[in-house]
Image: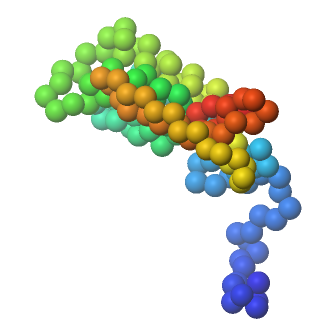
Amino acid sequence: MRKAGLKLNAKKCTLFKSEVPFLGHVVGREGVRTDSLKVTAVEGWPVPQNVSELRSFLGLCTYYRRFVAGFATIAAPLHHLTRKGAVFEWSEECQQAFVALKRALVEAPVLPYPQMGLPYIVDTDASQEGVGAVLSQLRDGKECGELLQC
């Protein structure tokens, strides 16, 4: 480290660990997953009563959107409530979207690391509610990657 001109602060170093928390994620041998400490906040999140509370919830969910397949489609009813001029009316559709997002984040998969040398597959999809793409690879005959669990 000295030869490279780098200095380490022992208080900030985490060495010889199989996984470490980093920016709301846990980085480990198998891949990247959501930090359970952050996700437990989602699990107990109360139903938003106004646009401000809804934006707070959606902000946290959007941070973890790569772990939720079909995020834009699931969250669409909630995003409609945040539009300028929209009346805040919590419908059954909003409640279902709210519960689905909470469940998806609590049950989020581990996103595996890419394997160099394997070809990549790009899957895309679009609807009236959202546009999405998944970068994956074939491993043992199974497609694995972002939003797809191995």
Please give the count of numbered marks on the rendered protein: 0
Q: Where does the image place residue 22, in percent across and percent down from the top left?
A: 64, 55
Task: Single out the residue that lies furthest toward the right.
Answer: 16
Q: Is residue 68 left or right of residue 131?
A: right
Q: Is residue 84 left or right of residue 23?
A: left
Q: Where does the image place residue 77, in percent across and percent down from the top left?
A: 33, 20
Q: Is residue 117 left or right of residue 69?
A: right
| Picture residue at 77% right of the left edge, 44% below the top | 30
| Picture residue at 79% right of the left edge, 33% below the top | 140
Q: Where does the image place residue 63, in percent across and percent down from the top left?
A: 48, 43
Image quadrant in which the C terminus is located: top right
For the residue pair 127 and 20, the one nearer the viewer reads as 127
Camera sees residue 76: no
Camera sees residue 71: yes
| Picture residue at 76% right of the left edge, 91% below the top | 3
Q: Is residue 8 above or below residue 14?
A: below
Q: Quadrant of residue 52?
A: top left
